[in-house]
């Protein structure tokens, strides 16, 4: 995009200064994963790096974690020299948030590079400060001509594949960082709280996979501290910390943040769990999620017992792009054969569906990305008779959760909502599906695309079957031929979306780690269907 200011991503000094504060993941002691319960000698340290989220044209949310109680201070500037820096006084960080904290920034210049540094100060003596941690990000553009480019993927530390120091940890994060996107959309399964790790795993070819281990990753998460430890685990990886210091995040959750295939009201029949009530587990995970990601909760604190937190939201990123971040987990009905003829709850819940329809109709962005944590037409089973996502393999008229999606697609067509496309992860391979009424049992919708990418650091799986209710055509797929292929045997996948500032044309690229672009699709703006 010719109007984007050139920012040299690989050698940026602010990112390097931040990343050098912490050694490689393999060198971090396991004890660093524990919450700092005791007062420590020395000065506060931010060994877990920094993150930025909730970025708009004029604001952002900066995150940090301390090793002890501390006051969070943030400075921002337009250059790496930090001349004429602005100072932001953040919260007092303590045990109530697992020593994490966020500071909102306001009045930032639109479409500009912002350099920031976070300093932690001793609450009892503000002169005693730790070494600053550096980061940088771009605010959303105010002008259409600036264009937008972002990445998406999901599924991290799953199926027994954690941080492997022998291969350099989560290498794909460094590859993504070098692309220098405006932001990263993490499409769920940000952690595998239900997937304990083993110190080593022998692969089919005889090689040995070795995991960095922590106490919290040795069992399924049940307590708040165990959930916190799962979110903390990925920050042990140097590649993740370097990525976070440069690329803002838009994060959603799915099932593995809590437990595989969970739904509200579920009571577990799983000997690994002493706490059987999934609603209690979900509340604990939601609280840890809100502590470990820089996400503004629309309805108060995540996991609050007094007010239900809301993870679905709209992210406005300039005139060209709105991202509608769905929560297809918290408001769904129970998993079932999914063939009921009447279903008002579906996978979104009635309230979220009303919000999505209203928000799509009100959006003035050229492109409207629907960020789904589960695919639409891919059949995802849950056991022998039940289904986990929208589709259930019945090729006829909409049934079960498909009824709600049919209502949404009909709304998009009749309200003439232009520029929609769906992005997701979840199934651990990458593919492109085109949906068209010409091939569908349900006809009353406009054609659209769904793109799938992942995992980032988890097992790869064969491609799922398609349900023809909405007429999907799998135009491209790259998937392993057997289940749970390790990241040493198969590349990880992520996607790229680029919107040109001059033409407003949108290009989707499906990428493989170390292998470049696998598939490219260009879309023209201003259309109800593509």
Image (cartoon, grey):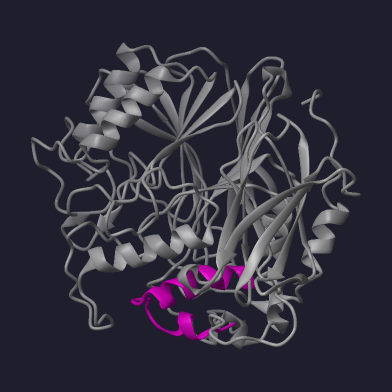
Which residue, as the protein is rendered here, is positioned at the far left?
A: 341
Q: Is 213 covered by the magenta stretch?
A: yes
Magenta portion: prevailing SS class: helix
Q: Quadrant of residue 55?
A: top right
Q: Is 231 covered by the magenta stretch?
A: yes
| x, y percent for residue 172 | 67, 59
The answer to whether 515 appears left or right of 529 in the picture is right
**271 up-or-down from 425: above or below:** below
Which residue, as the protein is rendered here, is positioned at the far front?
A: 124
Can see residue 447?
Answer: no
**398 up-or-down from 528: above or below:** below
Q: Quadrant of residue 54?
A: top right
Can see residue 517?
Answer: yes
The answer to which of 31 and 166 lies nearer the viewer is 31
Q: Residue at x 72, y 18 (%)?
A: 145
Q: Magenta segment range?
A: 212-236
The answer to which of 316 and 487 lies nearer the viewer is 316
| x, y percent for residue 134 | 78, 58
Q: Residue at x 68, y 36 (%)?
A: 139
Q: Residue at x 21, y 36 (%)?
A: 350
Q: Residue at x 45, y 16 (%)?
A: 418
The answer to which of 367 and 469 lies nearer the viewer is 367
The answer to whether 344 appears left or right of 374 in the picture is left
Number of numbered discs visible in the structure rendering = 0
| x, y percent for residue 443 | 25, 19
Image quarter hosting the N terminus = top right
The answer to which of 424 and 100 lies nearer the viewer is 100
**405 up-or-down from 126: above or below:** above
**487 up-or-down from 368: above or below:** below
| x, y percent for residue 201 | 53, 84
């Amino acid at each position: 995009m010719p109007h984007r200011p050139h920012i040299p991503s690989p050698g940026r000094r602010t990112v390097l200064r931040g990343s050098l504060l912490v050694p490689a993941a393999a060198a971090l002691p396991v004890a660093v994963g524990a919450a700092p319960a005791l007062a420590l000698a020395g000065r506060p340290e931010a060994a877990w790096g920094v993150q930025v989220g909730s970025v708009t044209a004029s604001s952002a949310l900066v995150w940090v974690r301390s090793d002890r109680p501390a006051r969070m201070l943030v400075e921002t500037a337009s250059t790496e020299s930090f001349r004429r820096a602005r100072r932001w006084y953040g919260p007092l960080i303590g045990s109530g948030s697992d020593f994490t904290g966020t500071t909102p920034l306001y009045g930032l210049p639109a479409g500009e590079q912002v350099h920031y540094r976070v300093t932690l100060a001793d609450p009892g003596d503000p002169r005693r400060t730790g070494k600053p941690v550096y980061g940088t990000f771009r605010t959303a553009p105010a002008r259409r001509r600036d264009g937008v480019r972002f990445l998406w993927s999901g599924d991290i530390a799953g199926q027994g594949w954690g941080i492997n120091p022998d291969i350099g940890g989560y290498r794909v994060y460094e590859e993504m960082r070098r692309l220098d996107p405006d932001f990263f959309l993490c499409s769920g399964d940000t952690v595998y709280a239900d997937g304990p790790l083993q110190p080593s795993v022998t692969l089919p070819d005889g090689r040995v996979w070795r995991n960095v281990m922590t106490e919290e990753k040795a069992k399924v998460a049940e307590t708040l501290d165990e959930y916190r430890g799962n979110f903390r685990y990925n920050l042990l990886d140097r590649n993740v910390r370097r990525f976070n210091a440069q690329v803002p995040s838009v994060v959603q959750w799915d099932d593995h943040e809590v437990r595989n295939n969970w739904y509200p009201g579920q009571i577990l029949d799983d000997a690994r769990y002493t706490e059987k009530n999934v609603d209690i587990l979900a509340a604990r995970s939601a609280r840890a999620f809100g502590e470990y990601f820089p996400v503004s909760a629309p309805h108060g604190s995540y996991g609050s017992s007094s007010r239900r937190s809301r993870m679905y939201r709209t992210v406005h990123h300039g005139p060209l792009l709105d991202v509608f971040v769905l929560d297809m987990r918290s408001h769904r009905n129970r998993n079932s054969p999914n063939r009921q003829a009447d279903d008002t709850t579906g996978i979104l819940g009635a309230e979220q569906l009303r919000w999505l329809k209203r928000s799509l109709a009100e959006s003035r962005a050229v492109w409207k990305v629907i960020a789904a944590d589960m695919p639409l037409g891919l059949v995802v089973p849950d056991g022998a008779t039940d289904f986990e996502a929208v589709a259930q393999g019945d090729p006829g008229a909409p049934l079960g959760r498909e009824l709600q999606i049919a209502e949404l697609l009909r709304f998009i067509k009749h309200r003439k909502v232009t520029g929609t496309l769906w992005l997701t992860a979840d199934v651990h391979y990458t593919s492109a599906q085109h949906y068209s009424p010409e091939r569908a049992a349900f006809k009353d919708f406009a054609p659209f695309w769904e793109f799938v990418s992942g995992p980032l650091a988890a097992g790869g799986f064969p491609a799922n079957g398609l349900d023809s209710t909405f007429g999907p055509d799998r135009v491209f797929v790259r998937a392993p031929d057997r289940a749970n292929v390790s990241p040493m045997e198969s590349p990880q996948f992520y996607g790229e979306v680029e919107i040109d500032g001059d033409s407003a044309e949108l290009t989707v690229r499906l990428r493989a780690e170390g292998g470049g672009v696998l598939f490219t699709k260009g879309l023209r703006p201003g259309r109800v269907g593509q």
